[in-house]
Each structure stands twice: as structure tokens, then as C-alpha cells.
Image: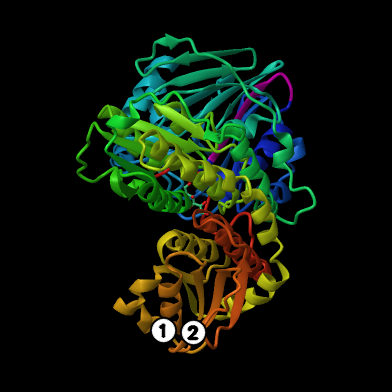
Amino acid sequence: MCGIIGISSNKSVSANIINSLKKLEYRGYDSAGIATLSDGEIIEVKSEGRVDNLENNFDLKNLKGNIGIGHVRWATHGIPNQINAHPHSSHNVSVVHNGIIENSTILKKHLINNGHKFKSQTDTEVIVHLITENLKTLELEYAITKTLKQLHGSFALGIVFKDIPDLIVGARRGSPLAVGYGPNENYLGSDSYALKAMTNKITYLEDGEFCFVKKDQVLFFNEAGKKVNKKILKLSSDEASYDKGDFKHFMAKEIEEQPTTIKTGIKEYIDSVNKDVNIFNFPWNIDEIKSITLIGCGTAYHSCLMAKYWFEELTNLDVSVDIASEFRYRKNRFKKDTLYIFVSQSGETADTYAALNLCNKNKMKTCSVVNVIESSISRESNFVLPIHCGPEIGVASTKAFLGQILVLYILSLKIGFLRNEIDRVEYKQKIKDLKTLPGLIEKTLQHDNDIQAISSTFNDAKGSMFLGRGFSYPIALEGALKLKELSYVHAEGYPAGEMKHGPLALIEEGMPVVVLAPRDNYYKKTISNMQEVIARGAKVLLITSKSKDEVVSENIWETIEVENTNEDLFPFLLTIPLQKLAYYSALKKGYDIDKPRNLAKSVTVE
Ligand code: F6R
């Protein structure tokens, strides 16, 4: 959840470290810091807040050193301030860390008893002093192996040593870490994104491994300290996606990119000539599967919930959905005939990754729906379905959500068809309808000025509710999540039929309530629930689909109509106005849309 960069070179590294830290800010942005080695000394600079602050506070252009490590932090132990910012250093070692050291309190006590002095409230500082202590009696490799064994929890580490002028040590357990190769220099990064401007040659460390990165050599070791050989992967170049272009924010760009997201997904997974789904070579016999469990966090969890409705509609499988942080610690009854599907944009979310590991350990059938194909979740699943939507930089997930639900919808169609659980004609028709989706999304994106105007009402209210039934319920949850994470107003997603069992008590005069009621099987029921909230004073924004029949209800505050389509596809269209609502609310408040407070894009801590 924090970002790490390390560079060992034959020239000054500070400029490239700063550039990489700016790229890594999506992983954390409450403080930033750099340590370089120059003239046998560790030089450490760090600041609270963004990398810009660090640049304003220090003359980084003149920061000397041909080797250095940098870090952007998302606080876990200790408040976000300059003292707790990484790197943390002793007289001879400096460390950057992503993850959580679970036994830090015990280790700290022990180190203090041995005379070590601590400056910060972080768990990371324990690692610095452990290495310093172990180096008193052991050679470097042994000191590292011993230190890693003493640590419980998760980590990706970058370490430099005052007395070893060209070496960065990297180590991984639970949190991702990559090595990159350049001309006369080599790199360490918490993901390939940070390294892409410098190289497209990457090696990923596996759990338990550590590495020695020098400007002209990289060595890898396993947990026991034995040297291992590893492959170098070549990454594709998609630099254009890392640029905001004419947009004010990545989020605005990513919302507008969604017709392309869907077009690409369709191109990858649909055979338009034969009207078939191009997903073959399942590593299991689909007929033997009796149930599906979908697992994810946050927005990806909402994609899982969405998929449950489609899988239940299009197959006869039992479907359950789980939040990864719950699944990983519950007593699960693993069943051989269950297919476990993991959904994650980053492919690195710690809880989702741990849930996958648990299933792999129990020899379950695992499939992942990911955006980052080089990610840990992707590499460790039996079967991978990439969403192909390109880098998503805005912290709030938008195009990845649409990409995830598209792939899950297509998968449910294919599985239903292979198992003869949906009719051939219906299957072909649904595939044909899918081809219209990019155009329908383009039309929905044209709702812009109306949503901008509406958004102020949500900002001025104490709270708001998002209601839907059936296929629209997961979208209501997603709409509420988007609004709360971006504009920091309380928003609650609810099944519309559940309001009378408690939440109706929250409705008061003027409270904004979004009702999602496309003309599907649930329409009439949802409209009745809408009338119940209007009767109690709610200001209802109705999002429905175009129809020749008028909506039979009075006192609706505002209505937005999306295009009419096959009812499976409404969720895609309903999502767009909700993303825009959240975007414009945050824009009016002047909030940092691409980096909302307290959040990070890649959540690699549990
Ligand atoms: C919300 C959001 C998060 C992520 C969640 C899982 O807009 O982006 O809720 O969906 O942190 O992340 P991934 O999909 O990378 O596993």
C-alpha cells in the first residue's frame, strides 16, 4: 500500500527517484522520503504530504548519490508526519517498507533493551535496528536471512547500507516487489508502473525471496538464502494511458474511456462471426462444477455481487459472494466442485491475494479477473481472465468496474451455454446485444450538465441513499461507495425493498435519494419503494430507462433516462451517471479527486 523505488546507477539517481515517486503516489500519499548514499554517508530527506512537498522543502536536484531508495507512505503504524515518513535509518542502514510487521512491539522492546534508540512510531524502524544488530555478528547475506526470519507479517523492503556503496537489498513477503534492468543501472520497485519510464525488463520476486541489486548485477535468493535464477519479463508499452491528456483528472478521463473499455473487452472475448464467447481451455471440466464463490474487496466486491445476479440467471449453479477480508479468516468448507473467482483491478490487494492463497493451499479451482496481468493474483490463479482496460490511475475505480462486470457477464454466458443451461437462441441474441453496449455507454456519457447541476444537492445534505432492486442493487452500492470516497459525504446503498425494515427512519425532508429503476422485472416494485421515500420527504433522483410509458409517480425531484436495452445490460448504463455524480460533487468541493484522503490505489496491507 506504500510505494517503493530503489536505483543503483553510475550517475546521480535523485531525479529518477522523484519521478518514480510521483508515479507511485497512487499507492500512498501522506508522506514521502528519499535516502541516498554519498561520500560514505546516508543522506535522508523526508516530508509530510505529497512528493511536491518534498520537492518544495529540499533542494532535491542537488541531492548527491548514485544509489538511493525512495518511498511514498500510506500510514499504518504512527500518524502521517515527517518523523514517521520513510526511509528510516540507523547510523549504517536505511530502509523503506511496504506492509505491516505484526511482532514489531515485541521486537522493539528487545532492541531497546539492547541499547537501540527509536525515533518514530513505525513498525518499520524495528527492521532497521534488527539489521543493524544482526550485522554486528553476521555477514550480509546471513544478517538479511536472519532478519527476515525474525519478522512476522507482510513486507516489501528496500535497504541501503552506509558501508556498501552500490548495493540495494530488496525482500518480499506478502507485498509485491519487482526488479528492473537498465543500461548501467538497475532498479527496485513496488510495481512495474514505477519502473516503466526507465525500463520494460522486469523480474518479480516471489514470496520469501530477496535480492541484491547493484548497478551492473542482480542476484536473487530464496528464503533459505540460496541463490535462485529468475526469468526476465518484457512489458508492453502503454505510456499514453499514463497521461491525463486534456482531462482535468484521471478519473474524468477514465470515465470517458469506458466505451473503449467495453469495445476492447468485446473484441477480446466475443467471436462476432460465430456469435460465441472466446473463452476456451478451462483447466477444469465445467460440468463438474456445482457452485461458484466470487471474492473481492470494495468496488471489485460489488462486481462480484453483480455477477451473482447474472450467474444465477444464466446458469443453475449455486453462487455465493464474499468479502476477501472476511473469507480469509472464516472457517470455510472448501469443496472440490466449487469454482473460486477472484476479482481485483490491481491483482495485488492483500486480502484478495490471501484468500486466493488459501484456496490454492486447499487445492481448489481458482480463476481471477484482473486488470494488471503481471500481478500476483494473476500469476497464482489456475485460470486468468484479464479485463484489458489499461492502467487505471484514479484511486476511485471506474473503468475497471465496467471491465470486471463485462468479463463476468461474458463468463456467466459461456458457462451457462456450455452446461446447456441457457438456450442457444438466447445465448446468440445476448451476444448480439452486447455489440450495442459501447454505443449505449457513449450516449449515457452525454448526461453531463444535468448531473453537474444535481451534484450540489448531494454535497449540501447530511447524507444520501442509493436504492435499487435485483440487478440494480449492486450498482446502488457502487454509487454510494463512489460518492463517499470522493466527496466525503455519508452515502448508503440499500436494496429498495429493505428500506421499510429500518433505514426509512433516516429519511427526512430534503434528503437526496437516488433510485435506480430501469424498465426491468423489478421496475414496478422499485417505483413503489420510491413512492415510500418521497412520501417521507426525500428528494428523489430517479435513474430509469427510456420508455414510451411515463413514470407513474408524483414529486420526483429529477429524472435521468438511460437508453433502453436488454435488461442484463442496464447495470453498465446505470453506473455512468453515478460515477459522474461522485466526480462532480468532489469537483465542486475542490477535493483531490484522483487521490481522495486516507485512501490508496493498491491496498497491499490487510
Ligand atoms: C473504490 C476502489 C476500491 C477497490 C478495492 C479493491 O473505488 O477502488 O474499493 O475496488 O480496494 O482493489 P482491487 O480491485 O485492486 O483489488
Q: Position of residue 142 (x, y in %)?
A: 38, 16
Q: Is residue 390 visible?
A: no
Q: Is residue 584 visible?
A: yes
Mark 1 or 2, nearer chain start: 1
7 is within the stretch colored magenta = yes
Tell me which amino acid carries mark 2: Ala
Q: Which residue is mark 1?
A: 532
Q: Position of residue 426 (x, y in %)?
A: 47, 45
Near mark 2 (Cα within 10 A), the count class, few <14, some 14-19 or many ≥20, is many
> Quarter of the image holding residue 317?
top left
Q: Which residues are magenta?
A: 3-11
Q: Which residue is mark 2?
A: 538
Task: From the viewer's perspective, tell me whether residue 261 is left or right of residue 122.
Answer: right
Q: CA distance from mark 1 to mark 2?
A: 9 Å
Query: Secondary structure of the magenta portion, mostly?
Result: strand
218 is within the stretch colored magenta = no
What residue is at 36 percent from the left and 72 percent from the top?
Answer: 497
